[in-house]
Amino acid sequence: MINAEVTRGVVAAFLDEVRSGRAVDRAAGLMAPRVLAHQVCSEDEVTIERTPADYADHVREMQATWGDFTLEVNEFLVDGARAYVRFTQTGVHRSGRTVRQINSVVYHVEDGVITEYWMQIDRAGLAHQLA
């Protein structure tokens, strides 16, 4: 039986520490060595492999673009090994504009680490804010 509380704890720590940019190097303890990241790009599903180090670098790149951003969890639902999270990221883009991005992600947890996730982002809304 999958323990939903373990799933909740892993994903909550990941969002609070890694995805938020507060402690990106904690990715190694919260992610599997190889994570499948399913994303939507121009209505096509794209799957890439992420390592904890790669993901930490990805968050650092976001920080370079957004500066110090806030991450607010709007919804957090857990069903066994899967957690659905909707969160809002707000930051000041390097253009000087305050920008808000809403993400929906489903994380899959096995053996106490994230092994896979499915993410959707409103990139058109983001581009509109920067236009």
Image (cartoon, rainbow, N blue to C red):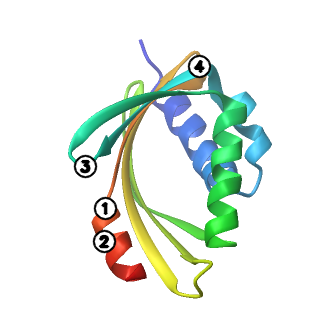
Q: How many marks?
A: 4
Q: Which mark is residue 122?
A: 1
In whole angstroms, how far apart are the C-alphas of marks 1 and 2?
A: 5 Å
Residue drawn where x is 59% and y is 19% of the image: 34
Q: Earlier in the sequence, mark 1 or mark 4?
A: 4
Question: Earlier along the polypeptide chain: callout 4 or callout 2?
Answer: 4
Q: Amino acid at mark 1?
A: Asp
Where's residue 48, x and y in %?
46, 29
Instruction: Residue 30 in the image: state x and y as whole percent.
Output: 66, 31
Q: Residue furthest left?
A: 43
Q: On residue 47, which mark appears?
A: none
Residue at mark 4 to residue at mark 2: CA–CA distance? 30 Å
Against 84, residue 90 (above or below) is below
The answer to whether mark 3 and mark 1 are in CB contact below 8 A is no
Judged left or right of residue 13, residue 106 is left
Label 3: element kind: loop
Alpha carbon distance from label 3 to label 1: 10 Å
Above-or-below relation of 118 to 120:
above
Residue at figure coordinates x 74%, y 57% from the top left = 22
129, 11: nearer the viewer: 129
Badge 2 is on which residue?
A: 125
Is disc 2 surrounded by few (<14), some (14 to 19) or many (20+) residues within 10 Å?
some
- Which circle's residue, 4 or 3, is located before the other in the chain? 4
Residue 34 - label: 4
Circle 2: element type = helix
Element type where label 1 sits in the image: loop
